[in-house]
Amino acid sequence: MTKDLSRRTLIGAGIAAVGTAAVVGVETPAIAADVLPGFPSGITVRREVYKNWDGVVSTDPLWTCVPRNQAQVLAVVNWAHAAGYTVRARGYRHSWSPVTVEPGTRKTARVILVDTTAHLTAMSIPRAGRLRVEAGARMDAVLGYLNANGYSIAATPAPGDVTVGGVLAVNAHGTGVLAAGESPEANQNMGTMSNLVVTLTAAVWDAGRGEYRAKRFERNDPDIAPFLAHLGRAFVLEVTLQVMPAYSLRCRNYTDIPTRELFASPRVAGDRSLSALLDSAGRVGLIWYTFTDHPWVQRWDVTPDKPWTSRRTRGPYNYLFADNLPDPVPQLLGRLVSGQDWVAPAFGAAVITATRAGLTAALARDMWGPAKDFLNFVKPTTLRVSAGSHAIIVARADVQEVVHRFSEWMTAALARYRDRRQYPLNSCVEIRVTGVDDPAAVGIRGAVAPSLSAAAPVAGRPELDTVVWLDALTLPGTPHEYAFFEELEASLRTDYADLGVARPEWAKRWATTADGSWTDDDVIAETPALFPEWGSAVRTLSRYDPDRVFSSPLLDRLMPG
């Protein structure tokens, strides 16, 4: 998608507020099916445009089917294998990466999308501490179901409109580590969602039967390792997840901590530094609006009883102001979208001012309620921006050094671009901190790590137990964005080598050159070396899908053979 098209998409949606209901990603009306010879009967099939979260991945109307159960999914897969089609799972498309389909995929492409969101959503509690769930279930529905049954999860992605299958495919994460002195609860897991999997059922090739069938993998089966974060190179039907007892959180939101304190050098860091907040609460998230010096800090403390100063929540998505920010934010956003990139500093200042006012007006500075009310806080109506992110795996003691170096680089880079009257980053930076995907946290003898997870433990480096997720966001089509992200990624790949390991976050943009993201062939070729089990993982996935029915052009480049 071109930059101009990205802008027209945003403008055409009507920028009346920062978060509109349909900036991009709206499902187009179904187009009458042409003909798919031999397609399984009884399964709805139509043509639909695929458009991802930020609108950068947009296609012609592609064949899309809506199976009612797992048996129908297998029927589609076996039809596709015989007909020479590839099969791609389609959830809510809340992703920035073309692992599903490439931008501009033509309607003549031999690919069929499988919408898992309509029917593949069943959930049950088969026994204490376990959730059985199909791949198309929404995460906010999962958290609501768990809470109603006395369970929860330690950390999940902030958006609720993501499917379980999509979350696991890219080892999506939330934020949270154990606070200093905190002991984990039963089944508490501070890694990514992929590390919660106890069992997994996927569609795999059975050579003896000459067809794809459902196969269940246990967490101590070495073959499960690449399926736990498969990047779309497999089709997961359902999983059983480890879940912990339900708990309550106190959420406090700060906008008064300056970057000089929050990101201070470890040598002088005080009690309002990120490392100090992590030691105190464990669960911290940062939103640092571009060209501002006071980030929005979200802190969540496990708090069984409601503090008298806290407002009790009534459900998730408690930042209502984030989708309806007042003037002059919409006007400045409209100017950004129209190409007036020089208003980025004013836009950042206006957004943090509106955030401060909104938190106070909504009584959202200090809230208390069940964990599920805070784990999901990004609504589908939130402004849709492009995101590039890397995971920096380090020792817990080095987290402050990571964010200090990152803030120094970001501040200097934006100033350098600004001196050239260029403003490539106009949204924010987000920072989250989790644990690694330690299989010991699953509590199953012989459990294996998710081999392709960006948060997989680093072989031979047990001291690297913490992941700092560094995410930069900008409106799609912003001038000079690709040059900026190319520089940012080079910094992320090299500037922390003395502390740990940097890996790309699969759902976000990476391998950027002047031609766009995922265009740096050298970076793509070098990425597998960051994962010690990459070769065996790719061989395992190929063994279970030898004809690459579950693949895409990007995956063919990343996982050839």
Image (cartoon, rainbow, N blue to C red):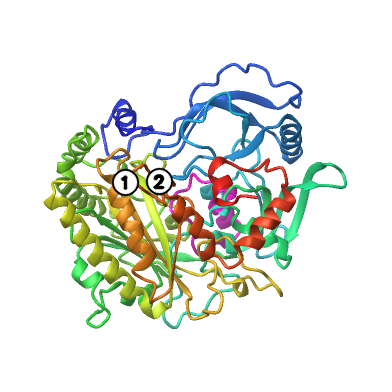
Q: Secondary structure at mark 1?
A: helix
Span highlighted in magenta in the image: 143-167
Query: How packed is label 1: few (under 14 Cα within 10 Å), some, or many (20 or more)?
Result: some
Tag shown at residue 482: 1
Tag shown at residue 221: none
Quadrant holding the N terminus: top left
Give the residue at the far front of this rendering: 522
Percent position of residue 244, x then y: 58, 66
Q: How many marks?
A: 2
Percent position of residue 464, x then y: 47, 76
Tag shown at residue 517: 2
Does the magenta-highlighted stretch encompass residue 149?
Answer: yes
The three-letter amino acid code for the residue at tag 1 is Tyr
- In the image, taking residue 529 as reference, residue 8 lies left or right, namely left
Does the magenta-highlighted stretch encompass residue 226?
Answer: no
Does the rendering let one see residue 294? no
